[in-house]
Image: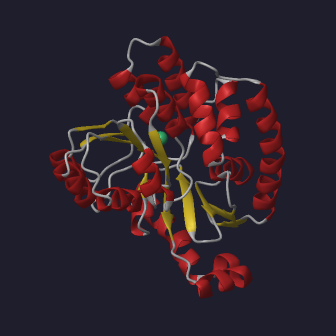
Amino acid sequence: MLLKRESDLSKALRRFREQVIHLTHTDLDAVCCDAIMRRKYGDILTIFSSVQHYSSYLDLLSELRQARDLTLCVSDLGGVLSAAVAIKQLKDDGWRVEWRDHHVWDSSTLDNVADTVDYLRVDPQLCACEIVYEDLLKNDPVAREIALIGRDRDFWINNDPRSERLSTVINNDHWRAAVAAKLSRGVFVDADIEHQYEVQIRRKKRIISNAMRRSKVYGNTAVTVSNGYSSDVAALLRDQYSSQIEIVLRSNGIFSIRTVAPVANRVAKLFGGGGHPHAAGGNLHFSFVDRVAFCVLEYRLAKVQQLIRAAPAFQQL
Ligand SMILES: [Mn+2]
């Protein structure tokens, strides 16, 4: 079952007769987590969410007060302290809660969530789908292959051409769910996926070339705007400018940051975000006025300048 909007959640949950609800991220790692969960549990209710947004889904789930035999599996989402309150409510309502992740958690959140959930595993050495594979379907060769594809993309190894194809295809929830379902049946490529890949690749080329055209360099930092494909854009910026820090902004103020030094998650944390040492994301919370000003000022906007200055300051520590 695929959740389309937040408002659909209560309806979907009422209709849902099975047991496992999967709250996960939006990238290929998350889709691979979902595929392995489906392979293990059959029909599950999946919520794909951005890192910035997922605790609002936890709040919603906890407000619905569905006191029946349900298991919430969270994967590929870093812990935030606000999540612990909602999780506590779900636990009080009798839910089972399992959380598998590979982001860097701060220790107080880790302790707090560990005390609340039934099972927690956070291992930054693996990607999330490898943790799910190891925990749930260790002896299953298809699950292993799914996990390897997730790893190939998530750790930017890019040895397996299927991982680039699949991560290109899964740029909306419909395709995330479709690919997860296919992978769960051991289908890694088919005509449907190939066709969607061609469609997406044309769109991707257009978005990336716009992003490169709008890029600027400040010292070691390359910055641009792109509403999508931030990993690809960041990698291209580094290629083109030999930069140490790459910032990819969305027009709503959400940003991705990549750093050569292991400081990306620390910079992102200053702006309400988090992630990995070399790749993280946060939010500059553009107001309406900021958005308008950003169209004119672009990277000279004060909030953007703050971010551009924050990363090199960390790097010199
Ligand atoms: Mn991941």
Seen in the image, is 77 located left or right of residue 68?
right
Figure check: 128 above or below 246:
above
Occupied quadrant, residue 157: top right
Rendering coords of residue 65 (x, y %): 27, 57
Rendering coords of residue 20 (x, y %): 37, 37
Figure check: 135 above or below 64:
above
Which quadrant, please, contains the C terminus?
Answer: bottom left
Rendering coords of residue 57 (x, y %): 40, 58
Frontmost residue, 171 versus 37: 37
Rendering coords of residue 200 (x, y %): 78, 44
Frontmost residue, 89 versus 193: 89
Residue at point 38%, 16% (across, down): 138
How many numbered markers are drawn?
Answer: 0
Observer able to see residue 119: yes
Occupied quadrant, residue 109: bottom left
Frontmost residue, 218 versus 16: 16
Residue at point 60%, 71% (across, down): 252
